[in-house]
Image (cartoon, rainbow, N blue to C red):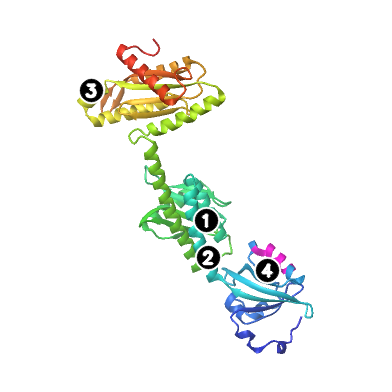
C-alpha cells in the first residue's frame, strides 16, 4: 500500500518516538525516521516487512494478541514488548496504537523505554534477591531463586554457580539449571579451570562451549566485601547480543547474589554454632532437646516407644591430665564418630558437654533393641585407636531410659538415663550384664 507522504505532517520525522503505519497484513507501510535511532533500521529497510518478525521471540504471542485488540477497534496506550535491534540486542518498547477504519491501517507510536526498564530491573533484582535471601531455607534454594530472577531479566539457556569447597578451597559446581547446564565432564573440567582463574583475578571472562560455534558462557565473579567467593555462569541463546547495559545488569545481579550468598553462609554458620557442638560436630544440648520434644510428640500420636542412652567416658580426666587437652579433644572427636557409626541415620547423637554424650533412638519396639545399641557402642569405643600417635582405648558407662516407661516428659526421661549411667559407673556393671 502506497502512502501519500504529503498527507503526513513534515515534523513527524523530527519526533524522537517512531511513528508506524501498519497494514492489515501486519506489514509496515510507513515508519518515521526515529526508527533508525531506536531499532537500527532505516525506514526504507523496514518498509514492507512484517513488524512481528522483529519482535523478540518470547514476546510474539502476546504482541499478536495485542495487535488483534487494536484492529478490533480498541485503542491501546502503554503496551510494552521487546524488539531485536539490528545489531542483535533487545530494545524495550512502549506503544500507543489505534486502528483507522478509513485508511485500514494500524497507527502506532513506539517509544524506547530501555533506560527506564533497565533501572526498574536493577531495583527489582535488588528487592527480589533480598527477599530470596530471607525466604530461602538453604543455599540450593537461594541459587534456584537467583536463577529465576536472572531469567526474568535476560533470556537464559544455561545457568550455574561455582563456589569454593570449604575444605580444599577448589572451585566446584554448587548449582546448575537450564537445558545447556550440563555440557559434559570434559567441559566441566575446563570450565572449572577458567572459574579458578576468574576467582583469582576477579575479572569476568567468556568460556567457550563444548560445541563449536555455540554461544559462549559468561563467567562473572561473585564478589562480597572485596573477596571473590565464587563464579556465576550464564548462557544466552544464539543471536542475542550482550550490550553494555546487559553486562551492567548481570554484573549488578552477580554482586547482589554474592552478598546474598555471603549472608546466607553467615546465617547458616551462626545457626550451626547455635545448634551443633563446635568440637565434635554433633548436636548440642539445645538441638537434642528440640529433637527429643519432636520425637516424644510423634510417639504420643503413634503410641510407640523411644529410648535414650546417656554415655559418660570412664577415665577421661586422666587422658587430659597425662596427655594434654589437645589429645583429649581428638579423643572426643573419635568417640563422636564411633557413636554416629553405631546408630541409624534417623537417630540423634549429641554431646551435652565435657565427656557426656546422649543418643536418642526413635521408635524402639523392645528394650532389647536399645541394649544391643548400647553394647555396639561399648565395643566400638573399646577398640584401640591411634590418636595423635597415642594408642588409646575408650571405655564408657551407659544408662538407658525409655518412653513412656520412665517418664512422659523429656526432662524425666533424660534424668532417669543419667541416674542409670551413674549406677553403672558406680557398680562397674555393663548394660548387657
Who is closer to the viewer here, 182 or 126? 126
Circle 1 or circle 3, nearest the eye: 3
Residue under numbered circle 2: 120
Q: Circle 3: is it few (<14), some (14-19), or many (20+) Cα within 10 Å?
A: few
Mark number, residue 209: 1
Q: Quadrant of residue 90?
A: bottom right
Q: Which residues are magenta?
A: 59-68
Give the mark, 2 or 1, whose residue is nearer the N terminus.
2
Circle 4 or circle 2, nearest the eye: 2
Q: CA distance from mark 3 to mark 2?
A: 67 Å
Give the mark, 3 or 4, whose residue is nearer the N terminus.
4
The answer to whether the residues at label 3 and label 2 have Cβ atoms under 8 Å apart is: no
Q: Quadrant of residue 203?
A: bottom left
- Disc 2 secondary structure class: helix
Residue 174 percent coordinates (x, y): 47, 47
Q: Residue furthest right?
A: 102
Give the mark, 1 or 4, whose residue is nearer the N terminus.
4
Circle 1 or circle 4, nearest the eye: 4
Residue under numbered circle 4: 53
Q: Circle 4: is it few (<14), some (14-19), or many (20+) Cα within 10 Å?
A: few
Q: Circle 1: is it few (<14), some (14-19), or many (20+) Cα within 10 Å?
A: some
Who is closer to the viewer here, 363 or 45? 363
Q: CA distance from mark 4 to mark 2?
A: 27 Å
Is 402 a magenta residue?
A: no
Circle 3 or circle 4, nearest the eye: 3
Above/below status of 99 relative to 128: below
Give the mark, 4 or 2, whose residue is nearer the N terminus.
4
Amino acid at each position: 500500500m502506497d502512502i501519500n507522504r504529503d498527507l503526513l505532517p513534515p515534523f513527524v520525522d523530527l519526533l524522537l518516538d517512531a511513528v508506524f503505519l501498519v497494514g492489515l497484513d501486519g506489514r509496515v507501510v510507513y515508519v518515521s525516521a526515529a526508527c533508525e535511532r531506536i531499532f537500527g533500521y532505516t525506514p526504507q529497510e523496514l518498509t514492507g516487512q512484517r513488524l512481528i518478525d522483529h519482535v523478540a521471540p518470547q514476546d510474539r504471542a502476546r504482541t499478536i494478541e495485542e495487535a488483534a485488540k487494536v484492529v478490533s477497534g480498541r485503542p491501546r496506550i502503554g503496551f510494552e514488548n521487546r524488539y531485536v535491534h539490528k545489531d542483535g540486542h533487545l530494545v524495550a518498547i512502549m506503544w500507543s496504537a489505534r486502528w483507522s477504519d478509513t485508511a485500514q491501517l494500524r497507527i502506532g507510536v513506539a517509544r524506547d523505554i530501555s533506560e527506564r526498564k533497565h533501572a526498574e530491573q536493577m531495583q527489582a533484582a535488588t528487592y527480589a534477591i533480598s527477599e530470596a535471601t530471607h525466604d530461602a531455607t538453604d543455599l540450593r534454594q537461594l541459587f534456584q531463586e537467583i536463577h529465576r530472577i536472572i531469567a526474568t531479566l535476560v533470556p537464559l539457556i544455561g545457568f550455574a554457580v561455582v563456589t569454593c569447597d570449604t575444605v580444599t578451597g577448589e572451585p566446584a559446581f554448587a548449582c546448575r539449571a537450564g537445558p545447556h547446564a550440563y555440557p559434559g565432564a570434559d567441559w566441566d573440567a575446563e570450565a572449572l579451570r577458567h572459574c579458578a582463574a576468574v576467582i583469582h583475578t576477579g575479572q569476568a571472562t567468556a568460556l567457550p562451549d563444548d560445541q563449536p560455534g555455540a554461544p559462549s558462557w559468561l563467567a562473572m565473579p561473585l564478589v562480597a566485601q572485596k573477596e571473590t567467593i565464587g563464579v556465576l555462569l550464564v548462557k544466552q541463546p544464539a543471536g542475542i547480543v550482550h550490550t553494555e547495559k546487559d553486562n551492567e545488569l548481570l554484573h549488578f545481579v552477580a554482586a547482589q547474589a554474592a552478598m546474598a550468598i555471603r549472608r546466607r553462609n553467615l546465617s547458616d554458620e551462626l545457626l550451626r554454632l547455635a545448634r551443633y557442638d563446635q568440637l565434635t560436630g554433633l548436636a548440642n544440648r539445645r538441638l537434642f532437646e528440640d529433637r527429643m520434644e519432636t520425637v516424644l510428640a510423634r510417639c504420643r500420636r503413634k503410641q510407640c516407644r523411644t529410648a535414650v542412652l546417656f554415655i559418660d567416658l570412664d577415665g577421661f580426666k586422666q587422658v587430659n591430665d597425662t596427655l594434654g587437652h589437645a589429645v583429649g579433644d581428638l579423643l572426643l572427636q573419635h568417640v563422636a564418630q564411633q557413636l554416629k557409626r553405631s546408630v541409624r541415620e534417623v537417630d540423634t547423637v549429641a554431646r551435652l558437654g565435657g565427656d557426656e554424650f546422649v543418643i536418642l533412638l526413635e521408635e524402639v519396639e523392645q528394650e532389647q533393641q536399645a541394649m544391643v545399641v548400647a553394647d555396639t557402642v561399648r565395643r566400638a569405643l573399646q577398640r584401640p585407636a591411634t590418636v595423635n600417635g597415642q594408642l588409646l582405648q575408650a571405655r564408657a558407662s551407659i544408662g538407658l531410659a525409655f518412653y513412656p516407661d520412665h517418664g512422659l516428659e523429656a526432662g524425666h526421661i533424660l534424668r532417669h538415663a543419667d541416674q542409670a549411667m551413674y549406677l553403672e559407673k558406680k557398680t562397674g556393671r555393663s548394660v548387657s550384664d
